[in-house]
Amino acid sequence: MIRETKRGISVAGATLVLLAVAAGPVQATQRSSHSLSSGIGSSATELYYSQDPADSLYRAARRALNQGSYREAARSFRQLGRQYSSSSYVGKSLYWEAYTLYRLGGEEELREARKAVLEQQEKYSGAARSSDSRELAALIDGKLASDYGDAEAAARISERANRGPVGAGGLDAGSRGPEQAGSCPEEDDDVRLAAINALMNMNSERAIPILKKVLERRDACSAQLRKKAVFVITQHRSEDVTDILLDVVKNDPDTEVREAAVFWISQVDSERAVDALEEILRSEDNRTLQEKAIFALSQHDSERAGEILREYARREDVSVGLREKAIFWLSQHGGRENAEFLLDLYGEIDSRELKEKIIFSLSQIGGNAAWLLEIATDESEDIELRKKAIFWAGQTGASLEEFSRLYRTIDNREIKEQLLFAFT
């Protein structure tokens, strides 16, 4: 809240200063780690065994891991398994050894990481969540395949990526959702997505059909999987990605999945993406999706994206709220073309809400203080809009002299008080 005595100037004092400046010149003071790193608990919440002989070594290894000292951490986790083979920490140490070696990323480290995570799965399956362990294994295989050309790792990745969820009949199950049996099974979504993502890095042409099959599913249980698949597919730069995402927006039954698709269309840098967003604005009834399409268009630098937003802001057949969104995002994009459009639009509309949004938006673009003060002097304008114009003129650098000149020429008491408020 702005106080009346901000910077020690009272309202009465402000009045005197404004009048003095109007009378003659005075000197005025210028005014961004992988989710698997918490797979078996953070160091703050993890269960420790203070009586275990390996306790101090395990804690030291965890500290090294948390500090990003992966090689030191890997050595300590490996030492624990060899030196304290009966410790309660052995299973967890194998998981973390695999994770730290994976983060190091060398071919030898990745092969050792795979051995460690397999041993953890076989002998100590309760030491980490099964899905975390299998996801880590998929990531390791993906890196071996993509960075070092390991054919066996590539085959394992392909098999995991094609594997359908338990009880859903595989990826070709379509709409025969497992929820028909009463509840969703525990699907290894993260494991499958890690495998598909790895396959994208290795051979995107093979991954795209698998992702399409994931996105064609309509069961409620696969909604989160589909949402993640939307992100993964945007990492593939091809002409058909936008069409795949647009199909999701039109046909997926889950609102969150559709919203995610609209957002990721904005990250596709192509005119086809702009066409898709325009189509969403033209044909979609869901307000949230329309808002996201407006935002997505504002993220495109193309001239056409700006034209679509300006046309949308002018449309009288859409809600005032959506037009306000378009006006706001035009202002955030900036530029004199958008500023001139908003100046023209202000004179064409009657909606008080839209006029208020334009006043604010022009203040965000900058260089429009003089126009804002013109609105303040226009007695045909709504009194609240005139007061808003004065406030935002003050926020955008209107000079003391301009305020003083206006103060002397205005008779309206409310406007005078707003000028004093803006000055103080």
Image (cartoon, rainbow, N blue to C red):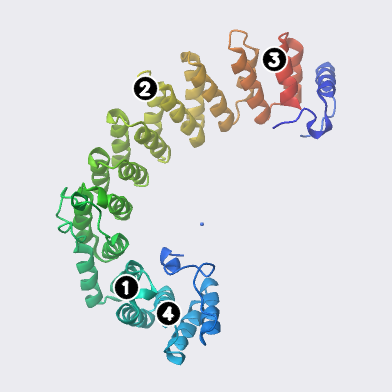
- Mark 1 highlights which residue? 137
The answer for how far apart the CA atoms under marks 3 and 4 are is 70 Å
Quadrant in which the C terminus is drawn: top right
Amino acid at pointer 2: Val
Residue 394 seen in the figure = yes
The answer for how far apart the CA atoms under marks 3 and 1 are is 69 Å
| Relative image position of residue 323 (x, y in whole percent) | 43, 25
- Mark 2 highlights which residue? 318
Quadrant in the picture for residue 187? bottom left
The answer to whether mark 1 and mark 2 are in CB contact below 8 A is no
Q: Earlier in the sequence, mark 3 or mark 4?
A: 4
Viewer-nearest residue: 423 or 352: 352
Viewer-nearest residue: 360 or 366: 360
- Mark 3 highlights which residue? 415
Q: Earlier in the sequence, mark 1 or mark 2?
A: 1
The answer for how far apart the CA atoms under marks 4 and 1 are is 12 Å
Amino acid at pointer 4: Glu
Of tags 3 and 1, the one toward the viewer is 1
Image position of 129 (left or right of 393)? left
The answer for how far apart the CA atoms under marks 4 and 2 are is 57 Å
Within 10 Å of the Cα at label 4, are there few (<14), some (14-19), or many (20+) other Cα atoms?
many
